[in-house]
Image: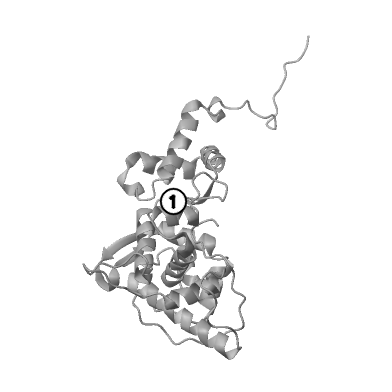
Amino acid sequence: MSEPVEWSEAEPSAPSATTAVTPADAADAARLVAFGLQPKLAPARDQEYTELLRRYREDPAFARLADAVAAGLGLVVLEVSPRAGMAVTAAEDSVFAVRMGDYARRTAADSGDRFLHGLAHLAAAALAFPRPEDLADDSYIGRVTVNGVDAFVRQACRRLEERAAEQGENTDPATDAPGLEAAWRIWARRSATGATKDARRPAASTTGIVAKALAFLTDSGFLQRTGDDNGGTYRTTARYQLQVRDMAGSAALAELLELGVVPVTDGTASLLPAEDTDDLDLVADAGLPFHS
């Protein structure tokens, strides 16, 4: 007569039926990603969104499933939290990626001005988060204005012109010369406001370009408009902080900050004096938050 089999404690238990991924789980994960693609939607205002965020944080299997859905759509998950929701950014090969050429056409801008539009976005990011600690502090709120961003770029233009003159370089390249440095010089020659018969701000003026950039960031959930002073005032959102944090390693953003034109952080047009910096090799792309 055989003895009964004794199960040891080390014997693995049978997998729980709840560990299997169900169509409902996949639908919930996709729903969470869909919420993340609505950047203006605050999690606190939608009970379903809040519940899915809680599930993501508490259920590792569900979190992996949601991450996989995002990855399949070419999205990179930056953060999942009550403050930012499911914050995602598009990878370069994603169908959701916004490219500078598409942006220029969307804003009815001359394709030749795409570097200027990219520079406006780059400057807005640098003005909103000028210090590493600003990006690292989740409670930090940056503030920018249309006139402040334009003044920031023009100060950078003057700094570049001074350095070029000191080094004996050509300070007046052809307007179609490629590269970010050429874009800065074109910006310096472009009228800040221009003039129209009905006193509107021309779209091709530098403040017009900045206004379009900040309006786009607002529509994308990165900024919130707070007033009309100084051409329009804006405050940053958690999503914008995450976006700029993700792009903080870009050479273009680092070079703009290293020029020594450090702005005050309330978004006004007053700037601190420029300081001498080491020579910089400016890169051609200023596409934040776009792909080239």
Q: Residue 9's x, y, as percent? A: 67, 31
Q: Residue 14's x, y, as percent? A: 63, 25
Q: Secondary structure at mark 1?
A: strand
Does residue 83 appear in this view? no
Q: Is residue 2 above or below residue 134?
A: above
Residues packed near mark 1 inside 10 Å, few (<14), some (14 to 19) or many (20 plus): some
Q: Which residue bears the numbered disc 1?
A: 81
User: In this view of the protein, which residue sits in the foreground, 208 or 125?
Assistant: 208
Q: Residue at x 42, y 72 (%)?
A: 127
Q: Residue 55's x, y, as percent? A: 45, 40
In the rendered image, which quarter contains the C terminus? bottom right
Q: Residue at x 38, y 42 (%)?
A: 49
Q: Write down the quadrant of residue 218 in the picture.
A: bottom left
Task: Please identify the residue farthest to the bottom as the structure is shown.
Answer: 166
In this rendering, position of residue 197 left or right of residue 67 = left
- Amino acid type, residue under disc 1 in the picture: Ser
